[in-house]
Structures are given as C-alpha cells and as structure tokens.
Amino acid sequence: MKIHESNDKYQASYSRLNIFLVVIAFVFLATGLFTACNKKDEQAAKPKETAISSQPAQAPTATKSKTQADWSAAIERVAKKALPTVVHVEVTEYQEVVNPMFPFENNPFFQQFFGTPRGPRKFKRELKGLGSGIIMDAQGHILTNNHVAGGASKIDVLLSDGKHYPAKLVGADPKTDLAVIKISADRPLPFATFGDSDNVQVGQWVVAIGQPLGLSQTVTQGIISAKHRTGIMNPSSYEDFLQTDAAINPGNSGGPLLDLQGEVIGINSAIMSQSGGFEGIGFSIPSNMALQVAKQLIAHGKVVRGWLGVSIQNLTPALAKSFGAKGLNGALIADVVKGGPAEKAGLKRGDILLKFGEKDIKDADTLRNDVATTPIGAETKATVLRDGKQVEITLKIGNLEDAAKFFSASVKDRLGVTVRPVTKDETEKYGLHPQQGVAVAWVDPKGPLGRAGFEVGDIILQINRHAITSAQDLDTLTSTLGPHQGIMILALDHRTGQKAPVQVVVR
C-alpha cells in the first residue's frame, strides 16, 4: 500500500506537471508564430530592400567570369599572332679536338707500361643543340641567342608551318648573347612586332613562346618579376635583364617574351636553376637592347660600342657619405685611363656621374650600357658630383675597338703579359668557339703568369670561372682584383691543346 500510495502520489504530481508543461509550450508556440508573422509582414513591406541586398552576392561571380574570359582571350590572341613568327633552331657544331693520348707519345714511362699511343693526333666531334628564334622581317632575318647559333657549323630552321630551311650566321655578339641568322624562303615571311621594353612594368602579364626541350610551339604565361637584373652571367657583358616567372626551359633560348598586345618585349636568354629546368626565375634581354644590337649585326656583321675610358663602381652607403652624395644613385669613377675620352673631358677619380645625356644614372651598369649604345664621336652632356657640388661637363664618346692599347697596359702591369685575339686557325686547331679566349703575345718571365709557367701562344679562357673573350674582359676582371689577390685561370697549353686550371697571384 505504501508503495502504491507513493506511486499514486507521484502519479498525481506527474499529471499536474504535464499540464503545466503543455501550457508553457503553447505560450512559446504562440509567441514564435507571432514573431514569424511579424518578420514575414516586415519582408512583405520592404520588397525593394530585400532585392537590393541580394545583388552583391552574385556580382563578384559575374565579374570574375568576365575577367577570366578576357584573360583567356588575350592569351589566345597573343598566341595566334606570334606563333607563326617563332621558329625552331637546330644547330650542329664540328670541333677538332687534340687526341688526349698525344701528349704522352714520347713519354718513356708511358711507353714502358702502355706502349706507343696509336691513332690520329686529332679527331673531330659533333655537337648538336636546340633553340628558338624570332623572325624580324619578311626577308628572313631571325633574332636568336649567341649561345644558340654563335659557334654553329650548321644551322637549320623549322618554321611553324613545318617547312625546313638552312640558315647562315649574319653576325653574333657574345657581350649581349645575341645573334642574327638568315634564311632564304620562296615567299615573304610573317614577322614579329617589337615593343618598347622601357615601358614594361613589374607585375605586367607576359607570354613566352619557344621550343622547350624540343617541344616546338610551346606557349607559357607569367609576369614580369623584376627589371634591370645584372651580374647574371658575365661581369664583362652588357646586361639589363627582365626577370620573369613565365616557364622557360632549355630550348626556349632565343624565343620571344611578349606583352598582351603581342609585341616582343624581350628575348629569352637564361634561367636560374639548381635542377637545370624551370624554377620560376627566367631572364630576357630587353627588346630595345636586342633591336639595337640586331640592326648593327645586320648592317655591319658586328657591334661597335662607345667607350669613355673609366673604371666605375656602384656606390655604397659608406662611399656615398665620404663623397658627399645624398643617395646611392650614380656611378663612382674609380679610375681614369690616361689619354682616354674621360681624361680629355676632365673627369677625375672620385667623381660621381649622376646624369648622362637626359638620363639619370642609377648605377654603374646603367652608365656602362648607355655609353656603349651612344654613337662614336657623339658629344654628350653629363652631370658630375665633385667635392659635394654638381659640375656640368661634355664627354666625347670614343670607340671601344680603339681601347685595346689602353687595356694592354693595365694587364701588363697586373699579370705580366700582353694579349691578342685568338686567330681563326687557332680556333679551329683547338676546337674553340669564335671569340673564345685571348692568346698570350708577350710574357714577363718574372711576372705572375711567367712564374706560373705561361708561354707565348698559350690561351687564357677564363678567370675565376668568368669567360674571357677580349682584352677588355681581361682588363675589366683584373681591375676589380685587390693587390696580391689569388685568382684561378683556365688556360689552354698551345703545345698540347690541353686545358687546365692554374692558380696565380696578381701584383
């Protein structure tokens, strides 16, 4: 009974609780329905506000789709316009190489163990390469890289329509890594339009076309990552690269870099890579520099450059402070060649060239490039900072080809040798590329190179891994060395034709 009683008691309480909960639920339900009706009435009362607020959610999608369509169409237009003007360049180079066993022919020790070497003293080897090019005019002039066609014995060109043509080398310029070749077609050829590379902006979209890894007519896209890149290849070369992240691989060399109007703004030349392939850092020669060089190669077969007769360097914060300069812009005159154009104009060591002609000088490379492209004999106004004050002078541009006699004095003093260009016979005899190395013409037995064993006729190919193509290269690299500094010279022995590195300490 107690249990039931107890149960009856809890049953009664439970019934009263149910009634209470039902009442509460009804109140909340009624309140919710009332609130929903109010919201519905509010929405009905403001239909325009609701319609307006729903628009922004759809607008970005529509804009994005239109932008994507415009971007895709732009790339398609560039490719359609430029592809017929881009060619595939196949090169073959025949080299005559000295038999590596020949130097041991008369060595008694070698003969005792291995016998007398047999076979020819020299043998020929064949090297093949691939690259790209851009047709410049209807007559068949094609602009490409020097490292593609400069040393070629045979050049073949494949057009976009599948036709093959043999090509001849018109001229090459190792200093800018540019070359012009020519084909003779039976019809006028489509040719590219060149744009103004000075107007290129960092972040601008670009398109690259070429034959990466032999895959012809390949189109890639990217942006201009940076401008005025220098010191990429050789300190004695003329560099002002455009940097891009458009995919460039071996085989793209010589192909065009284009803006979205389909105009050539650069010639693809090099990549920075640890793998040997595309890693997002490629370099193109600006179209303005490329056109200036190409026109000279077509007209004269070579490039003639201006010369001032100075050694220049960039300003550092410490140097700027010591010379009274307010910033780091300008080129510091480190030395002046006696009898050169700069000395005749009154330039002095310690002067800072701020302006050349109408152009402000950013750094030493800018001045060097501007002087090189100035016509020989032209008189150019320049602004110089001297003793904290700006001075106006007039410079008469000399000919770089006439500078060899001035360079030889510097090289003779630092290295104890005089040099001359490598002859055509020597190039063929030792299997060298054209304009590769300089030959020793005189040696001071007590000089740095004389003590290292150099003889007349030996050929200097590199200094500290930098290629030497002229006396100017040798002078430029030597002038940057400190007293008693050690350098590594890659030399070719004129007796055996063998190449070997030699350690030398300069004066």
Image: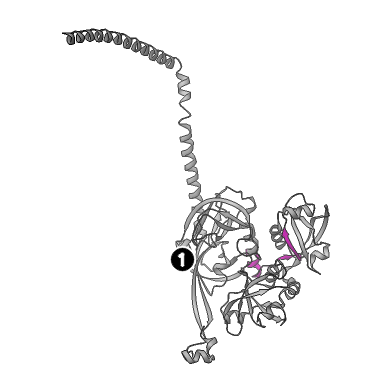
Q: Choose between 175 and 70: the one closer to the eye.
A: 175
Taking the spot 53% from the left edge, 87% from the top edge, the residue there is 104
Mark 1 lies on residue: 163
Occupied quadrant, residue 22: top left
Where does the N terminus fall, quadrant-wise?
Answer: top left
Q: Is residue 398 above or below residue 49?
A: below
Q: Choose between 68 and 276: the one closer to the eye.
A: 276
Is residue 286 part of the magenta span, yes or no? no
Q: Position of residue 24 (x, y in %)?
A: 33, 10
Disc 1 crowd, CA 10 A, few/some/many (<14, 14-19, 20+): few
Secondary structure, mark 1, is loop
Occupied quadrant, residue 297: bottom right
Q: Is residue 75 above or below residue 57?
A: below
Where does the C terminus fall, quadrant-wise?
Answer: bottom right
Q: Position of residue 89 (x, y in %)?
A: 50, 66
Q: Position of residue 75 (x, y in %)?
A: 50, 49
Q: Position of residue 378 (x, y in %)?
A: 77, 62
Direction from residue 332 to residue 489 in the image, left or right: left
Q: How did the renderer colour the structure? A: one colour
Please count the marks in the image.
1
Q: Is residue 315 above or below residue 340?
A: above
Q: Amino acid at mark 1?
A: Lys
The single residue placed furthest to the left in the displayed view is: 1
Occupied quadrant, residue 384: bottom right
Direction from residue 149 to residue 300 in the image, left or right: right
Is residue 312 part of the magenta span, yes or no? yes
Taking the spot 23% from the left edge, 10% from the top edge, the residue there is 10
What range is drawn magenta here?
294-314
Q: Choose between 379 and 317: the one closer to the eye.
A: 317
